[in-house]
Image (cartoon, rainbow, N blue to C red):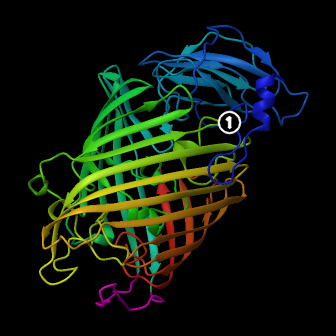
Amino acid sequence: MTIRGKMLECGLLIVFVLTLAIPGQLSAQEDANPAPAPQATPPTAVPAATGQAPNLQQFAVPCDSKIGERIFCAADTSAGVVLARSTGDAACLLGKTWGYDDTGIWVSDGCSGVFLVGRTSQPQAPQSRRAPEYVPNQGFLLYEGEQGQIYFRLFSYARYLNQRSLDSSYVDYFGNTKTIQLRQDVQLQKFFAPFSGWFLTPKFRYYLYVWSSNSSQGDPAQVVGAGNLSYAFNRFVTVGAGITSLPSTRSTEGQFPYWLTVDNRLIADEFFRGSYTSGVWLKGEGQAKIKYMAMFANNLSTLVVSATQLDNKFDTQSFMLQWLPSTGEFGLFGTFGDYDNHQNVATRLGLHFNHSLEDKQSQSGPETIENSQIRLTDGSIIFTRELFGPGINVDNVEYKMMSIDAGIKYKGMSLEGEYYRRWLTNFNGSNTVGIADITDNGYQLQASAMVIQKKLQLYLSGSQIFGHYGDASDLRLGANWYFIKDRGLRLNGELLHLNKSPVGYTAVPYPVGGNGNVFHVNLEMNF
């Protein structure tokens, strides 16, 4: 083993900030650290990676594609496949631009790389093949031709919700008693149908969808048509415009719906995060296992906000930076939990910063399907008339928020956490001079384990929020049963204990002011 390999094997162990930097790669995602690779050469034997049987050899299989083509490279993949390094201009994303079956490895749309297999078949000339008929989280291929490509996907779930053990009312910081409508019902909770692909050139991508929250029938924006357009110059730079999740916390980076729980966040994440909004963005990968995104948007949430309600200042900014030091990935789409069953330790460190000048018109209503109001820690919306006293009305405020997250995954187990800090300053409106700046803090922790690989996952998670207007917390114990050993279908059950929740709406299992226990069961389909 080289000196560098020994140093990496020693590593730097951390519990919550960073962990090991281990050589080798997991056979689940791309390595964002490109290096020169041999072109069209037979497979080359290399020493087995640390932790493998000493008599096992790995073989390097180069496989290259150009934009608009799909190439198949024959190999014996029975011992698994690892993307050792990426060598092309386009990103190599498992399930999207590379994958493998029992007979070999395929790459497409500019993905090129060197792959490690436990054994190799006789080298054969690369063969062109069409795009895969099915890609997880992208759906089924409806059409592919010289002018474009169309994938169709469906996401939906049915939920039984029981809130009857919650207190029926709560008292906010200002002494106001408010009633909670407790629920016990069954809902086909959400219907989400995206179309995605490319048009004229694989570099020009679209993602357009219809989205409905059935539990919010009767509320504004119960059915949403949205999406975005983007152009991928290479894996380093993609430019996009339209509606997407503001990259304000880890859960808004794009790994939905691969969370431990079904379609809802811990209350600290929900309290601090931004939402779906309209804007433009720049994202891509760096040379050292780094990914980034910068978005410039209209406001924190575009739902139930028309263009005439915006402040015409285009003054919302969000920045994300993530580092994947050990394996260069963190599971399929950066998921929560280790369903991928990492055999080498996978780690990540993320940083987010957000800034926005928000006014009462550009904030969505209190019961919308994806509300992201600026609230105090007692649940009060900051733009409520005379909230701080008679004659005191806040019309706009400056919002700043940062978060730092870290995580580790290994052999089906994961530990992931995030810290939040939010500042509310520069209150404007009638008689707002006496309102002091507001600083709130919070965190969340999530631990999970695959008790039965690809079938049963248990998790324990919780979060806390600390602020001048009250503290809040939640604690969750849950299980995911993948009854056909595929995460496209799962049955989720969760017991949730709330302590004065400052967030909530009809699409999530907790209400504003919730104090007590909630139980819910979800049957989720995602293809």
Label 1: how many Cα within 10 Å (few below 14, some 14–19, many 20+): many
The residue sitting at 59% across, 35% down in the picture is: 29
Describe residue 262's horizontal placement relative to residue 106 as left or right.
Answer: left
* Number of marks: 1
Residue 494 in the image: above or below residue 142: below
Q: Residue at x 69, y 59 (%)?
A: 449
**Which residues are the magenta region?**
164-184
Residue 27 position within the rendered picture, expressed as x and y whole percent measured from the top left: 67, 35
List x then y, in percent, for residue 48: 82, 27
Residue 185: image quadrant is: bottom left
Residue at 56%, 74% in the rendered image: 475
The residue lying furthest to the left in this view is 308
Residue 46 in picture, x, y percent from top left: 79, 19
Which residue is pictured at 71% across the width and 12% down the height?
123
Q: Main secondary structure of the magenta part?
A: loop
Horizontally, residue 66 falls left or right of residue 388, namely right
- Can residue 412 be seen here? The reply is yes
Residue projecting furthest to the right: 55
Q: Considering the image in quadrants, where does the N terminus appear?
A: top right
At numbered mark 1, what does the secondary structure look like: helix, strand or loop?
Answer: loop
Q: Position of residue 290 (x, y in %)?
A: 52, 34
Residue 438 counted in the magenta span? no
Quadrant for residue 82, please give it. top right
The residue identified by callout 1 is 26
- Residue 119 seen: no
177 is within the stretch colored magenta: yes
Q: Amino acid at mark 1?
A: Leu
**In the rendered view, would you say 296 is above or below 471?**
above
Instruction: From the viewer's side, name the closer residue of 386 and 102.
Output: 386
